[in-house]
Image (spheres, rainbow, N blue to C red):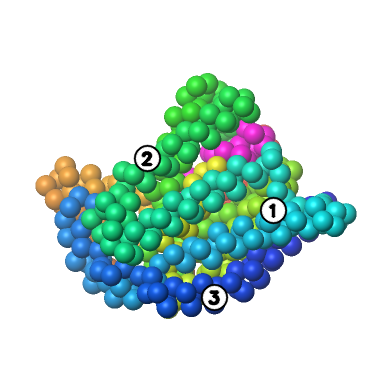
């Protein structure tokens, strides 16, 4: 028990230290080469203008570097490799602390780095004003296509290789899905990915994602998925290092290279803590990741309202966190209240996941 607890906590602290060490180097590079948008967003999803958003955030869009997510995934990767090498070279206690394992962390680490790489390409294109999107970068269709393909491949691995074809429901038990497990898997990954647009206010996304991954670390730990728990806490430590520099006024934004990596990895972790780990990781996902769900749903509601109600809006501006800003809430108040909600939802979700009935 003691070594398992150390195995979960020590890599997280290490990831935080690595992140704090590399961030000044990354920040210097981002500012030296002016890695920010050359013009603010002017076109919304449905093709209309974005005057309210520009009033709130136009200055930051063209003066604050993007790609801050590099801090997160670089810290995760370096920390993981360090503990892996220490385990190989020195063995003993270091071998016990190595959390890189085929059954629990290979898949989420691969997904994490895949999302980071695709997101990085999108960020570079957006910064340069190139690509096939209206503001530069990969179009939404292309990003959704790439996420769909990788999630489809991983769902095949779960279904055909690991024989996972069900999810667990609190107070009810196992729900057999059969082949429907595959499309449900893909849809959940896509929906969680859509929540990445929560990266819209200084410090908001970092605090929310830290709470979410810490919750799943707890679930994995109590289900004896120690390596997966350690991987989740490494992500938390890396996010906290990022957050140190992202709180208002942000030195950089997380952007797609961070949000894509975190969102699709979150979906994979949720599935791995479900029937694969004898838990309920999927059914508590809407609770633990409630801020992400709320963000996605607010955009969907706004889009449908404008499309089918002759341009009428439900919110002043979407996503929801910008609506609160438009109401007059200071950005720091929106961020802090989202953090509070995220922590409460994370605690409730963990309790619900661990209740034995």
Residue, far top? 178
Q: Residue at x 54, y 77 (%)?
A: 24
Q: In which quadrant will I find the C terminus?
A: top right
Left or right position of 96 against 212? right
Does residue 271 appear in this view? yes
Q: Residue at x 69, y 53 (%)?
A: 230
Residue that badge 1 annotates: 230
Q: CA distance from mark 3 to mark 1?
A: 26 Å
Which of these two is toward me, 39 or 285? 39
Q: CA distance from mark 3 to mark 2?
A: 33 Å
Residue, far left? 310
Q: Which mark is residue 145?
A: 2
In x, y percent, where is residue 92? 88, 54
Mark 3 or mark 2: whose residue is earlier in sequence: 3
In contact (CB < 8 Å): disc 3 and disc 2: no
Left or right position of 103 against 171? right
Which of these two is toward me, 314 or 30? 30
Q: Which residues are magenta?
A: 271-290
Q: Residues within 10 Å of mark 1 (few under 14, many from 20)?
A: many
In contact (CB < 8 Å): disc 1 and disc 2: no
Residue that badge 3 annotates: 25
Left or right position of 342 against 297? right
């Amino acid at each position: 028990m003691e070594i398992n607890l150390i195995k979960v906590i020590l890599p997280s602290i290490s990831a935080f230290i690595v992140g704090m060490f590399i961030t000044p180097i990354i920040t210097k590079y981002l500012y030296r080469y002016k890695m920010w948008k050359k013009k603010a967003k002017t076109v919304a999803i449905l093709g209309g203008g974005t005057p309210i958003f520009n009033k709130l955030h136009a200055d930051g869009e063209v003066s604050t570097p993007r790609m801050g997510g590099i801090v997160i995934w670089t810290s995760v990767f370096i920390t993981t490799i360090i503990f892996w090498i220490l385990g190989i070279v020195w063995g003993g206690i270091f071998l016990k602390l190595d959390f890189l394992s085929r059954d629990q962390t290979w898949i989420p680490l691969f997904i994490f780095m895949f999302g980071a790489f695709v997101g990085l390409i999108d960020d570079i294109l957006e910064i340069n004003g190139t690509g096939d999107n209206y503001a530069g970068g990969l179009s939404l269709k292309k990003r959704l296509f790439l996420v769909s393909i990788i999630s489809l491949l991983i769902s095949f691995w779960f279904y055909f290789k690991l024989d996972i074809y069900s999810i667990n429901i609190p107070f009810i038990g196992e729900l057999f899905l059969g082949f429907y497990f595959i499309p449900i898997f893909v849809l959940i990954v896509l929906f969680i990915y859509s929540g990445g647009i929560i990266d819209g206010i200084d410090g908001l996304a970092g605090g929310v994602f830290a709470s979410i991954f810490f919750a799943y670390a707890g679930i994995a730990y109590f289900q004896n998925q120690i390596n997966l728990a350690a991987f989740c806490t490494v992500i938390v430590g890396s996010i906290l290092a990022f957050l140190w520099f992202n709180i208002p006024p942000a030195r950089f934004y997380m952007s797609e290279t961070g949000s894509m990596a975190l969102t699709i990895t979150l979906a994979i972790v949720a599935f791995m803590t479900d029937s694969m780990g004898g838990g309920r990781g999927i059914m508590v996902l809407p609770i633990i990741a409630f801020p992400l769900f709320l963000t996605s749903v607010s955009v969907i509601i706004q889009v449908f309202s404008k499309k089918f109600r002759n341009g009428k809006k439900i919110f002043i501006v979407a996503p929801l966190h910008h609506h609160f800003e438009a109401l007059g809430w200071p950005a720091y108040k929106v961020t802090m209240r989202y953090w509070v909600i995220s922590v409460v939802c994370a605690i409730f979700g963990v309790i619900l996941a661990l209740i034995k009935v």
